[in-house]
Image (spheres, grey):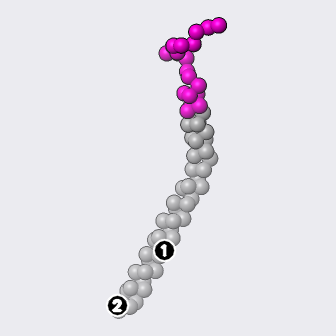
Amino acid sequence: MQDKGNVSETETTESELVETSKRRRIGRWLKRRRSVVANGILRGAAYGIGAGGIGLIVWWIENH
């Protein structure tokens, strides 16, 4: 049997491989959903601008 006590610099441990796999999986997940997130942000901004505009119009009507 071989002694696996010390891991050399070129070898990767199992935990490093698992961590790398998780990072890749998360990266792919984010890449696939990037447009969904961007659309959600754009939609929220549009709702905010619209609500603010309506609020300003109502305020202007009430004060004039």
Q: CA–CA distance between discs 2 and 1?
A: 20 Å
Say which element carries label 2.
helix
Residue 18 x %, y %: 59, 31
Residue 7 x %, y %: 52, 15
Circle nearer the N terminus (2, 1): 1
Residue 12 x %, y %: 55, 21
Please say if the residues under marks 2 and 1 sit with CB atoms less than 8 Å apart: no
Label annotation for residue 63 = 2
Which residue bears the numbered disc 1? 50
Which residue extends farthest right? 1
Above or below, 32 relative to 2 = below
Q: Which quarter of the figure is the C terminus placed in?
A: bottom left
11 or 28, nearer to the observer: 11
Residue 22 lies in what quarter of the image? top right
Q: Amino acid at mark 2?
A: Asn
17 or 1, nearer to the observer: 1
Magenta stretch in the rendered image: 1-20
Q: For the point 51% across and 65% down, which residue is it?
A: 44
Within the magenta stretch, is there residue 3? yes
Q: Residues within 10 Å of mark 2 (few under 14, many from 20)?
A: few
Side of 17 relative to 59 (left or right)? right
Q: For the point 58% across and 53% down, which residue is it?
A: 35
Which residue extends farthest top? 1
